[in-house]
Image: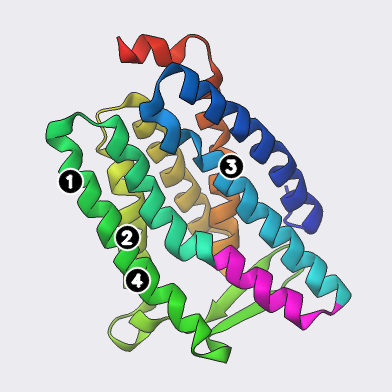
């Protein structure tokens, strides 16, 4: 699928309402899965923001591009490295939870240091429109102390490690799917890696919907 406003809006139109249904299902069946079930909703909202970035580009509206790019990057830099470990935290036995809480705190520190400087430096976030993708470029704070590849390696570690080390099979499977997305992005979409990675994550989050909505999945795990 090519990347476009239509693709982003379609993903949002599917993930947000379906994710809301998944949240209701988790609330009724096993509330430990609420944070995990919320991920498709957040992916859907992020895709909505990217659709609005595309729309701003088509209209030539610089204010739209800037504001909705900041909204999009909030999910990219801050939400995922905090919420993904946070969702694993609730699904773990109590004796293992402190590890995932530490991941979430680390993710918040890393994400905040990359995201909040955008508000102090106008040109640190640069949005470029390609034929079938958006490239979010510019400067991040860690550029001053290490190579950009190391920044992304740290980011991916904080997001993926809590999933693949989880004792929950659904979390581990989702983690492996995210690894597959990373490989595809590395091989084919380096020119727009942030957009491609998040769009791939949105697609993979349909697995969460399958897991949460499949009856009687949650009841079986809670017994």
**Mark 4 secondary-structure assignment:** helix
Q: Please say if 95 is above or below 195.
A: above
Q: In the rendered image, which residue does mark 2 sit on?
A: 107
Q: Quadrant of the C terminus?
A: top left
> Which numbered dot is residue 151?
4
Q: In the rendered image, which residue does mark 1 sit on?
A: 99
Lower position in the chain sequence, tag 1 or tag 3:
3
Q: Pointer 1: residues within 10 angstroms few (<14), some, or many (20+)?
A: some
Contact check, label 1 and label 3, Cβ < 8 Å: no
Lower position in the chain sequence, tag 2 or tag 3:
3
Q: CA distance from mark 2 to mark 1?
A: 12 Å
Q: CA distance from mark 1 to mark 3?
A: 25 Å
Residue 50 image position (x, y, % from top left): 68, 61
Count of marks overlaid on the render? 4
Look at 73% across and 71% down and name the residue there.
Answer: 130
- Residue in front for this viewpoint, 113 or 205: 113
Q: Please say if 158 is above or below 94.
A: below
Look at 60% across and 66% down and name the residue there.
Answer: 71
Q: CA distance from mark 2 to mark 4?
A: 12 Å
Residue 106 image position (x, y, % from top left): 26, 61
The part of the chain drawn in magenta is 60-73
Q: Nearer the viewer, mark 2 or mark 4?
A: 2
- Residue in front for this viewpoint, 188 or 135: 135
């Amino acid at each position: 699928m090519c990347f476009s406003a239509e693709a982003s809006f379609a993903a949002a139109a599917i993930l947000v309402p379906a994710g809301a249904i998944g949240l209701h299902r988790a609330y009724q069946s096993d509330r430990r899965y609420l944070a995990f079930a919320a991920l498709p909703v957040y992916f859907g909202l992020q895709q909505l923001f990217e659709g609005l970035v595309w729309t701003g580009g088509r209209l030539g509206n610089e204010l739209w591009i800037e504001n909705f790019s900041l909204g999009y990057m909030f999910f990219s830099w801050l939400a995922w490295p905090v919420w993904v470990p946070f969702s694993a935290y609730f699904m773990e036995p109590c004796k293992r939870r402190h590890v995932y809480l530490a991941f979430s705190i680390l993710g918040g520190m890393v994400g905040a240091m990359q995201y909040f400087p955008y508000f102090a430096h106008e040109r640190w976030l640069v949005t470029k429109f390609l034929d079938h993708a958006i490239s979010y470029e510019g400067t991040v704070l860690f550029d001053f102390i290490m190579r950009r590849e190391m920044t992304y390696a740290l980011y991916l570690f904080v997001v993926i490690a809590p999933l693949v080390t989880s004792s929950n099979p659904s979390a581990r499977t989702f983690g492996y799917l995210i690894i597959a997305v990373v490989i595809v992005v590395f091989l084919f979409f380096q020119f727009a890696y942030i957009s491609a990675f998040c769009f791939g994550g949105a697609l993979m989050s349909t697995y969460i919907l399958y897991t949460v909505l499949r009856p009687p999945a949650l009841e079986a795990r809670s017994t």
